[in-house]
């Protein structure tokens, strides 16, 4: 599958997003921008639940997506399972997601500073004091939320289940 087949209007570079936001007619803001981020390696019901809830906090949901090299640095050499282009395309296909922007860094801090969201959201496994960008978002008057996760869903658990079910290699 080639990358051009996975193009989607919701998948933007950081620069393209900022350019599009600056081209809005004067006095016509984007609205309340909500930002969340993650690897989203194997999209599951827990991710969709969090993204749908995040979208209710504003008008535009921007999802920061770790690049493949970023995921490898964070999760180890066997991840990501799904390449960036596919992860971005799947996220862009969700009705609740308005924009997907990949980032190369280990954290989304520089992307958060560029996007300047009004609301920053992470899953409940991230206490507010550990959420990257929380201090910056609050410094410009934004709000930060750690939302409860849908119990029993995690990418690691999905991978472990697949490995348990896989037949032994001879």
Image (cartoon, rainbow, N blue to C red):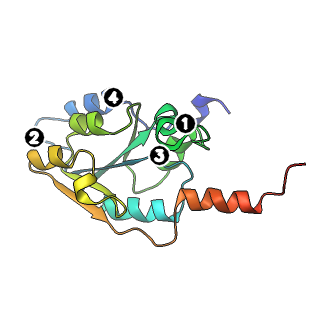
Please tell me whether mark 1 or mark 2 is closer to you in this view: 1
Q: Which residue is mark 4?
A: 16
Image quadrant occupied by the N terminus = top right
Q: Badge 1, how many Cα within 10 Å: few under 14, some, many 20+?
A: some
Q: CB under 8 Å between callouts 4 and 3?
A: no
First of labels 1, 2 by sequence position: 2
In three-dimensional space, the C-alpha distance between marks 1 and 3, rounded to whole angstroms, equals 12 Å
Viewer-side label of 4, 3: 3
Cβ atoms under marks 1 and 3 closer than 8 Å: no
| Earlier residue among tags 4 and 1 | 4
Are the two marked residues, 1 and 2, in contact with CB atoms closer than 8 angstroms?
no
Instruction: Give the mark nearest the N terminus, 4 or 3.
Output: 4
Name which residue lies at 11% across and 35% down.
Answer: 26
Distance, label 2 to label 4, CA atoms, is 20 Å
* Residue nearer the viewer, 160 or 63: 160
Asked whether the viewer can see residue 57, the reply is: no
Q: Residues within 10 Å of mark 4 (few under 14, many from 20)?
A: few
Local SS, label 1: helix
Residue 85, labelled with which disc? 1
- Nearest the camera: 86 or 28? 86
Q: Position of residue 103 (x, y in %)?
A: 39, 33
Front disc: 4 or 1 = 1
- Local crowd size for mark 3, using a 10 Å CA cut-off: few (<14), some (14–19), many (≥20): many
- Which residue position is annotated with label 2? 27
Q: Residue furthest right?
A: 170
Name the residue: 64% across, 59% down: 160
Q: Position of residue 11 (x, y in %)?
A: 43, 37
Q: Which residue carries the number 3 mark?
A: 39
């Amino acid at each position: 599958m080639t990358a051009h087949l996975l193009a989607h209007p919701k998948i933007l570079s950081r620069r393209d997003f900022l350019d599009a936001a600056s081209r809005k007619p004067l006095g016509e803001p984007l609205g309340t921008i909500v930002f969340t981020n993650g690897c989203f390696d194997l999209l599951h019901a827990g991710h969709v639940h969090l993204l749908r809830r995040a979208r209710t906090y504003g008008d535009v949901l921007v999802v920061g997506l770790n690049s493949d090299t970023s995921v490898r640095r964070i999760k180890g050499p066997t991840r990501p399972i799904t390449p960036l282009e596919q992860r971005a395309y799947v996220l862009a296909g969700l009705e609740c997601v308005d924009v997907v922007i990949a980032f190369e860094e280990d954290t989304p801090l520089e992307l958060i500073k560029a996007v300047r969201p009004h609301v920053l959201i992470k899953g409940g496994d991230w206490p507010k004091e550990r959420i990257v960008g929380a201090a910056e978002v609050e410094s410009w008057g934004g709000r930060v939320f750690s939302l409860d996760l849908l119990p029993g869903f995690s990418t690691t658990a999905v991978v472990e289940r697949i490995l348990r079910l896989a037949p032994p290699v001879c």
